[in-house]
Image (tube, rainbow, N blue to C red):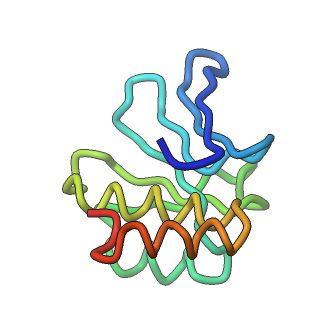
Amino acid sequence: MLERSYQVYVRGRLKFRVKQIVYVAFSLDETVMEFAFPKEERAALVASEPRKFQMPSASDMRFNWVHTDLSALDPTEARELVVDAWRMVVPRKLSRAYDLAHPDGPG
C-alpha cells in the first residue's frame, strides 16, 4: 500500500484515501475504477481512449475524477494511474521519495 494510504468501505465500495481525500475507488462489482486526475487534462485523456476512459457522472464533475473500465487496462497501466492519483493528494516530498525508491516507475 502507498504511504499514508488507508482503505475504507463506503456503501460497500472500496476506496483508498490519504487523510480524508479519496484518490481511487472501485465500483461495487469491481469492474470500474475511479481515480483522481487533473480536471484540466481529463477531457483530453477521455478523448484519447474513449473505450478505456470516461468522464465522471454529472454530480462528480466538480471533483478531479476519471472513470476507467478495469478490463481495458493492463496491470502496469492500472498501477501507474493509481500512483499518479496518489501523487495528487500527498506532499511533494513523499512523491519524490517514492520516485527515489522506485527509479523504474510503479510498474
Answer with left or right where residue 5 lies relative to residue 72. Answer: right
Residue at 61% across, 42% down = 5
Residue at 61% across, 20% down = 9
Answer with left or right where residue 17 lies relative to residue 25. Answer: right
Q: Position of residue 24 (x, y in %)?
A: 55, 46
User: Is residue 6 placed above or below 58 in the rendered structure?
Assistant: above
Q: Position of residue 30 (x, y in %)?
A: 38, 30
Q: Nearer the viewer, residue 105 or 8?
A: 105
User: Is residue 94 placed above or below 44 in the rendered structure?
Assistant: above
Answer with left or right where residue 106 lies relative to residue 93. Answer: left
Answer with left or right where residue 81 lies relative to residue 19. Answer: left
Residue at 37% across, 64% down = 80
Q: Nearer the viewer, residue 46 or 38?
A: 38
Q: Nearer the viewer, residue 83 or 64?
A: 83
Q: Position of residue 4 (x, y in %)?
A: 65, 45
- Image quadrant holding the C terminus, namely bottom left
Q: Position of residue 76 (x, y in %)?
A: 24, 60
